[in-house]
Image: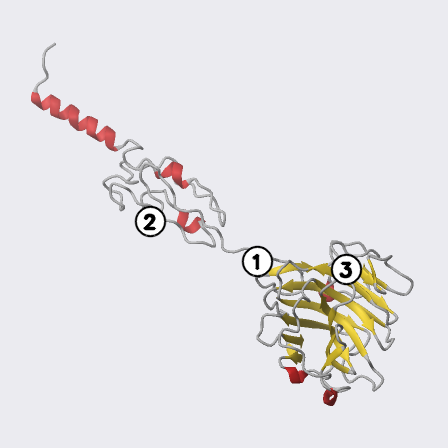
Amino acid sequence: MRALPPLARISLVTLFAAACASSPGSGGSGGSGGSSSSTGGTTSTGGSTATGGVTGTGGTTSTGGVTGTGGTTATGGVIGTGGTTAAGGTAGTGTGGAAGHGGQTGTGGTTATGGAGGGSVAAGVIFSDDFEADTAGKQPTGWDNLINYNRNASNPMGNLSALADSTQTHNGSKLALHIKSDGTMAFLERALPSGTKHIFVRAYVYSMQQLGMGPQSDNHESLIGITADPTHTQLRFGQMKGAVGTSLASDDNLSPPMAKWNGPPIISAQTWHCIEVEFDGTATYNTLNAWSDSTLVHSITQGSDWDHGAEPANWMSGLFAYVQIGWESFSSLGNDVWMDDVVVATSRVGCN
């Protein structure tokens, strides 16, 4: 065969080099990589072909150089719209080279736990219940009961019950927990994780009885508590001697001291209140704080906050086995109490 003249050979080499420059592989095809789906937004198309040649998707005309970096703007042609597609997260660097990645998938941020419907839910939620999935007239699922010191008794039991119903609900919800008592114990209980030593209990509460500024004949009433065992060893927040306060069943001690009995503050009747109770068994002197609608209404932070003498510094030790909600009165004070949007967490939930 006759050899080609030098000029013809140079022309063929030039044509072959141009063809290679338009090849998708050598220019860093951003197309296939850019198609990864961003969870926070629309799918990044990465361009129809993202050839990287004359269109400059990673070739010599690409702003990213030979490697064709997609960057945050991903300007190498039609590709790399991953910046705008990663809604809720930052677009990745997305190399426009051979792998053609369009950037790390935008995660969209941390998903907020909805939990109970009445307010924001903090991190560290152990459990929450808005009772919406329950059946009216039935005990809410996931709870045990303690009725007249009978564990998992018949519910209702005569005039005592702790059932879901719609007669009073918080924030327009469908159902709430309704506790009905003639003064005798009617509680629901739920176990806490092993090793728990510090919790916040938040509940929206509607009580037919006022707490605080009670009569001289009042003994004590329980609303929210924790207990070392399902039946007896309880720490109970509610009303003590006519004042918003706490009782400790193990030795029948109570707070506040006598000077504050039958006095303010009050938690008024027949309206919804956001009640929060902190049980802190990790504090140097174990601490209890209670808020009504974000206002502190009761606290135990030192030995002098007790009436029958100071409790030891670790007085909550061993009590974190169960949470209790309900009603009991040692003054035979009957009550109807509704609770909704209950949250138990390791940090304060708040009322928003």
Identify whether 112 is placed above or below 201.
above
Q: Is residue 142 left or right of residue 56?
A: right
Q: Earlier in the sequence, mark 1 or mark 3?
A: 1
Residue 78 rendering spot, x and y as whole percentages? 36, 42
Residue kind at label 1, given as amino acid type: Ala
Q: Which residue is mark 1?
A: 112
Work out whether residue 145 or residue 139 is closer to the camera in this orientation and state it. 145
Per the rendering, the mark at residue 71 is 2
Label 1 element class: loop
- Asked if 31 appears above or below 263 in the picture, the reply is above
Determine the CA span between mark 1 and mark 2: 30 Å
| Label 3 residue SS | loop
User: Mark 2: few, some, or many residues within 10 Å (few <14, many ≥20)?
Assistant: many
Q: Which color scheme did the rendering employ for the protein?
A: secondary structure
Quadrant assignment for the C terminus:
bottom right
Q: Nearer the viewer, mark 2 or mark 3?
A: 3
> Which residue carries the number 3 mark?
175
10 Å crowding of disc 3: few (<14), some (14-19), many (20+): many
At 20% from the left edge and 29% from the top edge, which residue is drawn? 17
Whichever of callouts 2 and 3 sits on the residue coming sooner in the sequence is 2
Q: Position of residue 344 (x, y in %)?
A: 66, 63
Residue at 66%, 63% in the rendered image: 343
